[in-house]
Image (cartoon, rainbow, N blue to C red):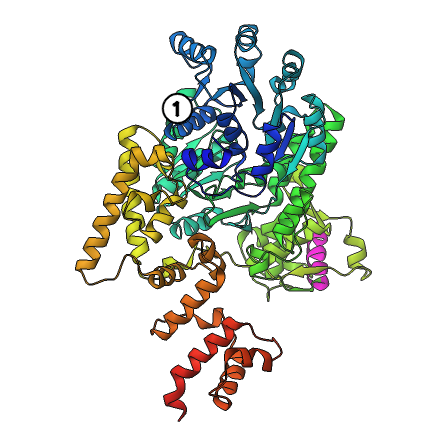
Amino acid sequence: MTTQEALQQYFGYQTFRPMQQEIIAAVLDGKDTLVLMPTGGGKSICYQIPAIVSKGTCIVVSPLIALMQDQVQALQTSGVAAAFMNSAQDERTQAEVRQQLLLGKLKLLYVSPEKLLTQSFLELLNMSQISFFAIDEAHCVSQWGHDFRPEYSQLQILKEQFPGKSLIALTATADKVTREDIITQLHLTKPAQFVASFDRKNLRIEVSEGTNRLKKIISFLKAHPKEAGIIYCLSRKSTETLCEKLAEKGHNVGFYHAGMSPEERARVQNAFLKDDIQVMCATIAFGMGIDKSNVRFVIHYNLPKNIEGYYQEIGRAGRDGLASETLLFYSYRDVQTLKGFIDQIPNEQFKALQEAKLERMKQYAEAQTCRRKILLSYFGEVLENDCGYCDVCENPRKQFDGTILAQKALSAAIRTKEEVGLNLLIDILRGARNQKVLEKGYHTIKTYGAGKEVSAFEWKQYLQQMINQGVLEVAYDQHYALQRGGLSQAVLQGKKKIFLVKPQRFKAKTTSSKTALQPTLFDELFEKLRKLRKQLADEQRMAPYLVFNDATLTEMARERPTNQAEMLTINGVGHRKMDLFGTYFLEEIQQFIKEKTLAGKQVGGNTYQITYEMLQQGLGLQEIARKRNYSLQTIQNHLVTLYEKGHNLPLADFIHADEVNTLVHYWKKHPQSTMKACFEHFQERFNYFKIRLSQAIWLKSKPQLK
């Protein structure tokens, strides 16, 4: 079996993702390999396909029991001979797996590093035919990584005991220092190194001030009904508190942290994987074991301690490639809390490293430029243009000279003997007459009411920016009093200008424009397929996304296959899953088409209608072309035909009003002209799509022009 045949038969994909084929070739060539690929980028395929087409068994080292169980179940469902061994199994089950390994019946065997390092297991491997070793979550090997695990550091024994076997190390997040350390610690020999693009284009990125978090989260969840998501919190207590408050508002929510019993953690995690819990409030203990592909959003209630951890955590959204949201709340209190944790680190070198990484995280949260550029730059990747899909790109920040505001704030802080906190300082600046202000006599100071033209919301954001810039600082040991910062003297003397950014009001953004529209045929069918998936998954006692992921259901709902041959062209439908589940989904689609046809609606087979429905869902022309496996020109032709047939289209998305006027004027003057003549007349200024669209607009408007 070729790698291409294995990809199609077992995983149901027609083509490899970028870089996968090159990595697989290196592994099959017997080379040690290091793979750095973002979460959701398709790392697992890079060792699973070579394992399937090679003789012997690939031994996969995985850090968490839940993760290996999930991956093995997914492989078995796809028809791959895979198993795992861990301490949670009874002796009889482990004996059966050992027998399968010795008889060469397994293509992949997943084990924890603790299990791998036992003498009995190493002896078992020596008696078995091993194809190669795969180390998943390889950043755990390095003390410079964000999730170092001591047991991983002993994995160098693999090269000592099995010198003839190659090793592939895979991770989603590792900077240059960590990558070099992985190579050293695992004793990799001249490894082939592959660093995939970290640009997860399907993830929208947003950072919001850490004020009114609960209100913002409730607004966010309202905009994402029925969608699965994770909310990461810094403390165990906050996961429980937030969960309780969201449950009171009617949300289907659970919590997860390391202080729970193993049985309770397993129960809530399983409920989340099976879509019985929609939203999980969790500490980062809820991490690598989550292979759920239909997580549609990740929220960070608190600032993460480094960019590696943050990027890995947001990567748990949209693993299936569909549009997903990420939201990070940021406050200076979070920074100080994390600094407190770092201060407890005894190793000075490691402590300094963590401080530097926290500073980079802080700079990212405070950034006023494209956030994706900053993230990709951290991993050594250059993004030429702004992404257009983060909060900064969508709402470019407006800077203004805030020196006078900074002087007013400093003056108020000094005149209160630098003893008041942020909220009280705002009351003084705005001229509030509350009990605290009057009791302390703050209404008599010169700066009282000096900033009443600025709202409390704006003052809170401006003071936060002043703290971040060093104009003010927080005395955490003095009840969070605001005091003069390093730049205060220069600002007061007018030697230093301070620039502030107009605050942005939080707006929960929906994942696509479809929520603002009436449900389409696509929406109706997708919901029917989603319910069918849940029903089948419950019957099989498995997670719904292991039946088919959201991307596969989306393609089914768009393309509406009506027979087995058509169903096998859907990405994610392999032969084994076709045998297990395909018939049920075909019947559901056929019944849907029959019902809609009887109701007088055109449903199946109309390629223009499918393109139109995808446009209604908010997809761009490039994305429609990619998902339908058509050329962009074909989809553009569909658009023109749809317009000619009278469909209501957002023409401004494709051609500017000035361009329409210019081209329609040309057609009025040269009604017998050809598109090629028009193209040459304007010296290739307009492409053929705009020319043809303008001609359709002109022809449609001709009666009115007479």
The kind of residue on which mark 1 rests is Glu
Give the main secondary structure of the magenta stretch: helix
219 left or right, relative to 401: left
Closer to the camera in the image, 639 or 210: 639
The magenta stretch spans residue 672: no
The magenta stretch spans residue 416: yes
402 left or right, relative to 423: right
Name which residue lies at 43% across and 24% down: 69
Name which residue lies at 78% across and 52% down: 487
What residue did someone put label 1 on? 264
Q: Position of residue 425 (x, y in %)?
A: 62, 53
- Secondary element at image label 1: helix
Q: Quadrant of the C terminus?
A: bottom left
Closer to the camera in the image, 234 or 394: 394
In the rendered view, tell whether residue 40 sits above or below residue 697.
above
Magenta segment, which residues?
A: 403-419
Q: Residue furthest bottom?
A: 706
In the rendered view, tell whether residue 106 sits above or below residue 583.
above
Residue 147 visible in the snapshot: no
Name which residue lies at 65% across and 14% down: 157
